[in-house]
Image (cartoon, grey):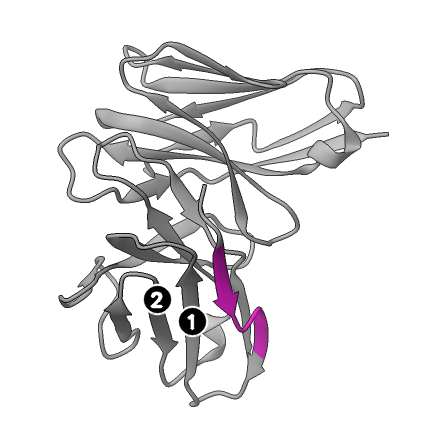
Amino acid sequence: SQQGEEDPQALSIQEGENATMNCSYKTSINNLQWYRQNSGRGLVHLILIRSNEREKHSGRLRVTLDTSKKSSSLLITASRAADTASYFCATTKRGGANSKLTFGKGITLSVRP
Amino acid sequence: SAVISQKPSRDICQRGTSLTIQCQVDSQVTMMFWYRQQPGQSLTLIATANQGSEATYESGFVIDKFPISRPNLTFSTLTVSNMSPEDSSIYLCSVDRGTSQYNEQFFGPGTRLTVL
């Protein structure tokens, strides 16, 4: 199956709540990146976590990485309606050529005002 | 980050025609990538474009269908040739800045292509 599988596939929450999205992958990685995509537009880079890192913060975002379980989570705290978007994780394979990204299927987040 | 622009932002084309998509970066980068995102799907890498060499295509993508140019370190084009409705997708270019294995990759705004 595809490297980088997110769950849930869709998430609907109330504004102000926290949103947690998970991503699993299959091979050893160099890094994992999370992206946001609004309404089929370009991807916005949110955060990169290296394979030797376990947790990283950026504003309202918190990303964790568990290489033993080959999984990552993205937490958005105090969600806003503007956070409504699709979220993708993407991995770079360890030992792989260049910096090719392998994307997960994506999670659709809806934040209700 | 990187400022990346793409032209056109969207287009509607007839079956059998070709469309060339341009990608411009605000600074020199070694590697540029082209991705396809089919409706409701995730992104799939088409090819890696390095300046001064032939593009490297992923399995399932061929040069005759998706010729790529990389004339300098800030620009690349992707042509979608002999289009069919199945080519209707968003096409995105991305760049990888730096030389380490921990580089962030940034994406352009995408080109939404509809083939009738």
User: What residue is disc 1 on?
Assistant: B22
In primary-sequence order, the first of circles 2 and 1 is 1
**Magenta segment, which residues?**
B4-11
Q: Is residue A95 left or right of residue B4?
A: left
Report the front residue among A76 and A7. Answer: A76
Label 2 or label 1, whichever lies nearer to me, is 2
Is residue B9 inside the magenta stretch? Answer: yes
Residue B89 visible in image:
no
Residue at figure coordinates x 44%, y 80% from the top left: B84
Tag 2–tag 1 contact (CB < 8 Å):
yes
Looking at the picture, how far across and down is residue B114, in whole percent?
Answer: 56, 74
Residue at figure coordinates x 59%, y 54% from the top left: A41
Residue at figure coordinates x 43%, y 56% from the top left: B26
| Dot 1 amino acid type | Gln
From this view, report whether residue B23 is shown above or below residue B48.
Answer: below
Circle 1 crowding by C-alpha within 10 Å: few under 14, some 14–19, many from 20? many
From this view, report whether residue B104 is shown above or below residue A71.
Answer: below
Circle 2 crowding by C-alpha within 10 Å: few under 14, some 14–19, many from 20? many
| Dot 2 amino acid type | Phe
- Could you say whether the residue bearing mark 1 is in a helix, strand or loop? strand
Looking at the picture, how far across and down is residue B23, in whole percent?
Answer: 42, 65
Q: Which mark is residue B75?
A: 2
From this view, report whether residue B116 is shown above or below residue A73.
Answer: below
Q: Which residue is at the far front?
A: B27
Looking at the picture, how far across and down is residue A36, in whole percent?
Answer: 56, 38
Is residue A8 inside the magenta stretch? Answer: no
Q: Looking at the figure, which quarter contains the C terminus of chain A? A: top right
Both labels 2 and 1 in a single chain: yes
Distance in Å between CA atoms under marks 2 and 1: 7 Å
